[in-house]
Image: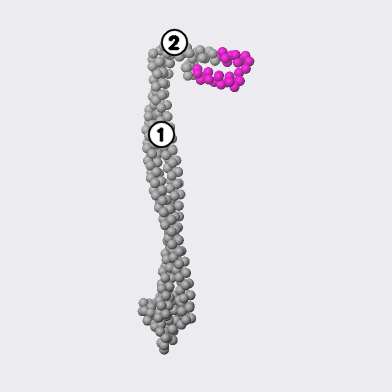
């Protein structure tokens, strides 16, 4: 009986140690579960916020695209006005030139305008800067440039004195201002739409990245919860074993001596073997142990 009591006492210490170990392991896994839950919830909150930002940028992009279409319509109308104003100006200049020169036979010469003269002057200036004209040719080019400049001033002065030409030029300038403003507005709206689109794509990537992290945290949460449940199960089993051993020790301490001692010892040993083999003792068996005197 003393030998069995010693064995039971050793088993009690071992099971108590195991129970403490399982409890510590369970608490560690539960702490990790809480940590992963917090991380997952924070990431999911960030994902929801990012998704809202994506939607806002998508709405801004659609609004800017609609604005681009509206501004393009305005610009198209401005382009038409510029074209009409140029046509009117060319018509007035043609009538003026025909009135000054009369109707002559032969091949019609290229119409000379302030714009064409300026284009010729700019061409000569570029050639002169590159050093394409040297020596006597350089003097000829400089003379030609002065003549063109003088002709431009003469034609502008003549056009300014012509009320219809002046009005046509004013209409052209006004139409070109409207055209340029409309073009600038189109570019601004298009740039804003592109920026909103780029930001939407950037946040979409961030949503995917944060969502993946949230899923990783959720997987770790499930893993830690599973490990915590397993450790808790072993902890409960260890407690049951510990209580059973303690009950047997108490029963043995209260056992009586006499003819029934040998039979009681055998029965206790059988119950102990049953417990150590993994079986669970019933309430009746525990009560039977407690009745040993």
The magenta span reads 117-144
127 or 292, nearer to the observer: 292
Tell me the SS state at disc 2: helix
Q: Residues within 10 Å of mark 1 (few under 14, many from 20)?
A: many
Tell me the SS state at disc 1: helix
Q: Is residue 138 visible?
A: yes
Q: Residue at x 42, y 36 (%)?
A: 192
- Of callouts 2 and 1, which one flags the residue occurring earlier in the amino acid sequence? 2
Q: How many marks?
A: 2
Q: Residue at x 39, y 83 (%)?
A: 293
Relative to 120, is 11 above or below? below
Task: Give x and y (percent) for residue 4.
Answer: 47, 80
Alpha-carbon distance for marks 2 and 1? 48 Å
Which tag is nearer the camera, tag 2 or tag 1?
Answer: 1
Rendered image: mark on residue 100: 2
113 in the magenta segment: no
Q: Residue at x 38, y 24 (%)?
A: 81
Q: Is residue 140 left or right of residue 117?
A: right
């Amino acid at each position: 009986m003393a030998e069995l009591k010693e064995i039971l006492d050793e088993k009690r210490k071992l099971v108590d140690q195991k129970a403490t170990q399982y409890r510590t392991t369970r608490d560690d896994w539960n702490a990790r579960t809480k940590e992963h839950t917090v991380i997952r919830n924070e990431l999911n909150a960030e994902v929801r916020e990012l998704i809202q930002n994506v939607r806002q940028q998508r709405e801004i992009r659609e609004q800017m695209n609609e604005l681009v279409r509206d501004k393009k319509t305005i610009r198209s109308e401005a382009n038409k006005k510029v074209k009409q104003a140029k046509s009117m100006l060319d018509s007035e200049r043609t009538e003026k030139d025909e009135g000054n020169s009369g109707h002559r036979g032969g091949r019609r010469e290229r119409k000379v305008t302030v714009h064409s003269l300026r284009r010729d002057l700019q061409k000569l200036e570029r050639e002169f800067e590159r050093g394409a004209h040297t020596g006597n040719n350089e003097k000829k080019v400089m003379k030609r440039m002065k003549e063109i400049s003088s002709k431009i001033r003469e034609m502008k002065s003549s056009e300014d004195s012509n009320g219809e030409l002046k009005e046509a030029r004013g209409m052209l300038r006004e139409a070109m201002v409207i055209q340029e403003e409309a073009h600038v507005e189109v570019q601004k709206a298009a740039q804003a739409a592109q920026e909103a689109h780029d930001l939407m794509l950037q946040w979409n990537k961030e949503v995917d990245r944060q969502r993946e992290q949230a899923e990783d945290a959720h997987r770790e949460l499930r893993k830690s919860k599973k490990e915590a449940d397993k450790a808790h199960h072993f902890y409960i089993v260890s407690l049951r074993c510990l209580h059973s051993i303690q009950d047997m020790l108490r029963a043995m301490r209260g056992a009586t001596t006499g003819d029934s001692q040998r039979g009681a010892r055998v029965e206790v040993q059988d119950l102990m073997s049953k417990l150590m083999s993994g079986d669970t003792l019933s309430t009746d068996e525990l009560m039977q142990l407690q009745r040993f005197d």
